[in-house]
């Protein structure tokens, strides 16, 4: 293959999205032609404040604080240590982006269509991509999901892997479909769990691993490729409830400030 694959990346601005972005930018075989940034907090009906309060109501203050730390606080921390945020990196590279609560609405749809991507890649993205957008790339829409699908479908698989004391988890690179976490599989990569891992560090490992293998799969993609169907039973987990987050806190850490600041300094 001589031509670079044209990729649009769909994500929610966060520490995890930076990890995936950096792998995309490093690849000599890919051209990142645009980014779709989600501004949705739980529902497109909510603004940031109402959505954040809803997160506290659903999952408790500690878990909501963890989410704040890897998203909004992360943007502030980057500025404090003079590191570019996600948008800053895009501006440095002259990569266009659109911010939207719904990727399926006309503004984002036309943005993607005009850039004529070969591949739409999503990771840490909190929106369902519907069929009209799924049909836009010439090759495929694929997703990085931080579990071994169909196990641990849902919004935070790493949290539930640790909570349920799973001996292993992993990453799935899969085709997107009209349902969350249901598309055919391109590749799965197993990762052994370590009891000492915080939720932050486990997610860092999973998204890094997923990004490396997603880049590989994008380079190998062939038109009409189907992947393999998901086999076995799966369970979809929505946001953790306060009981689960309290139980989690007795067994694990969300993160430590030492590892948090070290990660930011090393970005």
Image (cartoon, rainbow, N blue to C red):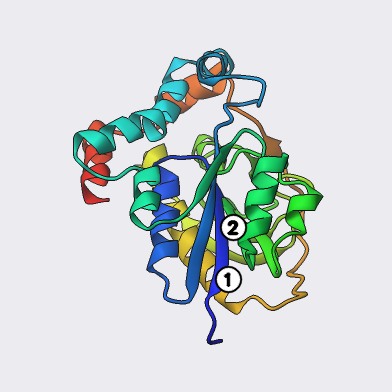
Residue 69's disc number: none
Contact, mark 2 vs mark 1 (Cβ under 8 Å): yes
Query: Where in the figure is residue 198, as x and y percent of width and height?
Result: 37, 39
In this rendering, does residue 145 appear at all?
Answer: no
Residue 121's disc number: 2
The secondary structure type at the circle numbered 1 is: helix
- Is 218 rendered above or below residue 208? below
Residue 170 is left or right of residue 76, and the answer is right
The secondary structure type at the circle numbered 2 is: strand
- Is 255 rendered above or below residue 184? above
For mark 1, does the 10 Å Cα neighbourhood hold few (<14), some (14 to 19), or many (20 or more) residues? many
Residue 218's disc number: 1
In this rendered view, identify the residue nearer to me: 21 or 151.
21
Tell me how far mark 2 sits from mark 1, CA to CA.
Answer: 9 Å
In this rendering, does residue 117 appear at all?
Answer: yes
- Is 49 rendered above or below residue 149? above
Query: Where in the figure is residue 208, as x and y percent of width and height?
Result: 42, 57
In this rendered view, identify the residue nearer to me: 100 or 208.
100
In this rendered view, identify the residue nearer to me: 107 or 147.
107
For mark 2, does the 10 Å Cα neighbourhood hold few (<14), some (14 to 19), or many (20 or more) residues? many
**Residue drawn at x 42%, y 25% as measured from the top left:** 249
Which quadrant does the N terminus fall into? bottom right
């Amino acid at each position: 293959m001589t031509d670079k694959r044209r990729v649009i990346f769909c994500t929610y601005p966060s520490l995890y999205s930076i990890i995936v972005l950096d792998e995309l930018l490093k690849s000599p075989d890919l051209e990142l032609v645009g980014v779709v940034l989600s501004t949705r907090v739980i529902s497109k009906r909510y603004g940031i404040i109402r959505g954040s309060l809803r997160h506290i109501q659903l999952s408790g203050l500690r878990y909501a604080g963890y989410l704040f730390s890897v998203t909004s606080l992360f943007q502030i921390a980057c500025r404090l240590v003079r590191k570019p945020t996600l948008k800053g990196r895009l501006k440095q590279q002259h990569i266009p982006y659109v911010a939207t609560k719904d990727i399926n609405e006309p503004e984002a749809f036309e943005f993607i269509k005009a850039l004529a991507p070969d591949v739409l890649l999503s990771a840490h993205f909190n929106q369902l991509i519907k069929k009209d957008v799924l049909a836009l790339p010439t090759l495929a829409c694929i997703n990085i999901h931080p579990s071994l699908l169909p196990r641990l479908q849902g919004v935070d698989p790493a949290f539930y892997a640790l909570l349920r004391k799973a001996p292993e988890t992993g990453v799935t690179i899969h085709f997107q479909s009209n349902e969350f976490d249901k598309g055919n599989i391109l590749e799965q990569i197993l990762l052994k769990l370590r009891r000492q891992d915080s939720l932050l560090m486990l997610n860092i490992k999973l998204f890094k691993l997923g990004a490396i293998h997603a880049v590989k799969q994008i380079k190998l993609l062939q038109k009409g490729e189907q992947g393999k169907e998901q086999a076995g039973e799966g369970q979809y987990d929505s946001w953790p409830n306060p009981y689960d987050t309290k139980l989690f806190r007795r067994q694990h850490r969300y993160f430590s400030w030492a590892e948090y600041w070290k990660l930011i300094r090393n970005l």
